[in-house]
Image: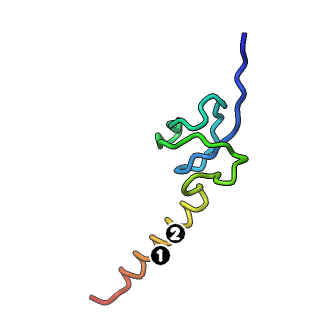
Amino acid sequence: MSTSVYFMQECPTCGRNIQVAVKFLGRKLVCQHCGAVFEACDPTSATYPPGNSGIALLDRASQLLESTDVYRARPR
């Protein structure tokens, strides 16, 4: 009987930690929490996390919300 080895990876969309089997490295996965599709990556590699991490995504969302506040505050 073989046992799988797992690592934890953060979903780039919702930021939740997901347990991923090593055999899925490099494959597309679907987050069971939010349904986002992302690639399973080695958490010790120099390019981890791929794309935006959850923190970067929240920072970008804050920037976008601030820009809409400025737009709404403009006189019409």
Q: Nearer the viewer, residue 74 or 24?
A: 24
In the image, residue 52 sits, relative to residue 68, either above or below, namely above
**Can you name the residue that lies furthest to the left here?**
76
Dividing the picture into quarters, in which one does residue 43 lie? top right
Under mark 1, the amino acid is Glu
* Residue at the spot 31% in from the left edge and 90% down from the top edge: 75
As shown in the figure, which amino acid type bears the numbered disc 2? Ser
Q: Residue at x 73, y 47 (%)?
A: 44
In the image, taking residue 6 as reference, residue 69 lies left or right, namely left
Q: Which label number is shown at residue 31?
A: none
x%, y% of residue 56? 58, 62
Residue at mark 1? 66
| Mark 2 crowd level (few <14, some 14–19, many ≥20, 10 Å Cα) | few
Quarter occupied by the C terminus: bottom left
Q: Which mark is residue 62?
A: 2
Q: Residues within 10 Å of mark 1 (few under 14, many from 20)?
A: few
The residue closer to the viewer here, 10 or 76, is 10
The residue located at (61%, 35%) in the rendering is: 25
Q: Percent from the top left, x then y, of residue 49?
A: 62, 52
Question: What is the basis of the colouring in this image?
Answer: rainbow
Q: Secondary structure at mark 2?
A: helix
| Residues at marks 2 and 1 touching, judged by CB atoms closer than 8 Å | yes
**Residue 63 pos. (x, y %):** 50, 72
- In the picture, measured across the screen, residue 57 lies left or right of residue 44, that is left
